[in-house]
Amino acid sequence: MKPHEIQGFTKNVQLEAPWTEIVIHHMKTALYLDAGEYEEAFLSQKEVVQSLQRFMPNMTRWVLPVLYLFNNDLRLIATRADQDKEAAEGQRRKLEEAANVISKSFTYCITDRGPMMTSKKYGTYRMIGMLFRIYFKLKQQNLCKNILRAVKAADMPSLEQFPKSDRVTFRYYLGRLYFLEEDYVKAENELNLAFKECTKHHLKNKELILQTLLPVKLMKGMLPTKTLLSMFPQSRQIYSQLAIAVKKGDVKSFNIALTNSESTLIKQRTYFAVEKAESIALRQLFRKVFLVMGQNTRLPIAKFQQALNFEGMTIDIEEAEWMLANMIYKGYMKGYLSHEKMYLVLTSQYDLSTFGFFQRNTMLEVMNFSAITVTERTELGQRQSVEVENNVIHIYMNSQGLSGIIISDKDYPSRVAFSLLNKVVDEVLTKYSHWNTADTIEYPELAQYIHKYQDPQQADNIMKVQKELDETTTIMHKTIESLLQRGEKIH
């Protein structure tokens, strides 16, 4: 039978509208596909979808499986037609045409005003999955934002009320969209949910999710386990050696593994993200230097240069200094660089977010010099506040010689500062009896206190409850100059 003969063959077949028309076009599509005429098959299938769309306002939720089938067939035929015949310059590809038709099906679903029990809104995320798949294939991800805006504005049931397959597909593409925008926190969240909800019977889909999820994890220093990689051979081939190299701090092996997987990662659009994980390998390498040097907090930059040269990275000391500065800027290590002496000084906790990046090293040096000077001139059991340019150093030295220092601006309330100093000094004495013999101590609570006490008003409320500060204590207020002996100068 030829496609033009179908009209006469079905002349005596009368179905309720629009099904007669749909049957005719559906049979034409099948015949065109059988003959390998994919462009004609696309046009015929397009008529199938549009015939159904014309009657969509009068239909309820029962029609959704048919809608899914017709629209997905249109997508598949359009893809095959584009493979069969490359579009001329300036001519729209069939997949683009299919996207326009499918977007109307999406609109009929999301704008349905019928009762929720029979609403076509429950087909929304299935249609979104089809559209996102097309947009990513066409590299037109910006169109996804129009869909997301429409979903946000619509009165929709919660995502959890939709089928699991629709949720997984939506979260997978949403995670990839965030990934391309370099919003890695949101990308990780969506991809984690997609991977968790995707069942173990769909390993191929789980591996697709891992293609984007693993680079995000790797950038954070979270390495895939051997158990995970054993389940997914493609991921194992790419990330097994990368993960080992990162864990060992073997920068040379990391770059070799990255080069071996370069073409695959570029195809997956994750190459630059994985490349950023080199910083994690560098951090591990620099940590080895720290351990070999006896966990000393003052380390010559030349030692890091030697470690990098050993890894096959022939660089001068200025470039090693730049790499250390970059690690500090990214938050991979805490400290500052002394350019004059070419040393890395590791520190505990600072909040220098109000200063520009290029001011931070200078400010750290000033703060450290001032803190040492004030400490040397503070007696046991004494509290005092010392002005340094536009800042104030608050210091408390207990009777055992353990001192705590806060450097703040002039407006920060001194009694709030001393409340925090009392708390920190007491906790260190209680938890670390060896404080006076240890090179360093781990005190993670300090970062939390610095964050909490940024707001003096909030800290003051805490202080009122705890009653930590002895308000009868006399606090001496001086300037840095008054602490220096006659003849000393600040350099």
Image (cartoon, rainbow, N blue to C red):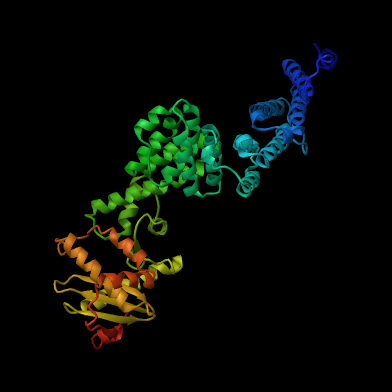
Residue furthest bottom in the image: 486
Residue nearest the observer in this picture, 91 or 446:
446
Residue 353 position in % (x across, y down): 42, 66
Residue furthest top in the image: 1
Residue 436 position in % (x across, y down): 15, 65
Identify the residue at horizontal 42%, vertical 41% (top origin). 255
Residue 207 position in % (x across, y down): 47, 31
Which quarter of the rendered picture does the C terminus lie within?
Answer: bottom left
Q: Is residue 91 left or right of residue 66?
A: right
Q: Is residue 304 left or right of residue 20?
A: left
Quadrant hosting residue 163:
top right
Q: Is residue 110 left or right of residue 237?
A: right
Quadrant hosting residue 426:
bottom left
Which quarter of the rendered picture does the N terminus lie within?
Answer: top right
Q: Is residue 177 left or right of residue 199?
A: right
Residue nearest the observer in this picture, 253 or 135:
135
Q: How many marks?
A: 0
Residue 369 visible in the picture: no
Up/down of 207 relative to 465, above or below: above
Residue 91 visible in the picture: yes
Residue 404 position in % (x across, y down): 24, 71
Identify the residue at horizontal 72%, vertical 26% (top origin). 81
Quadrant hosting residue 326:
bottom left
Up/down of 149 relative to 457, above or below: above
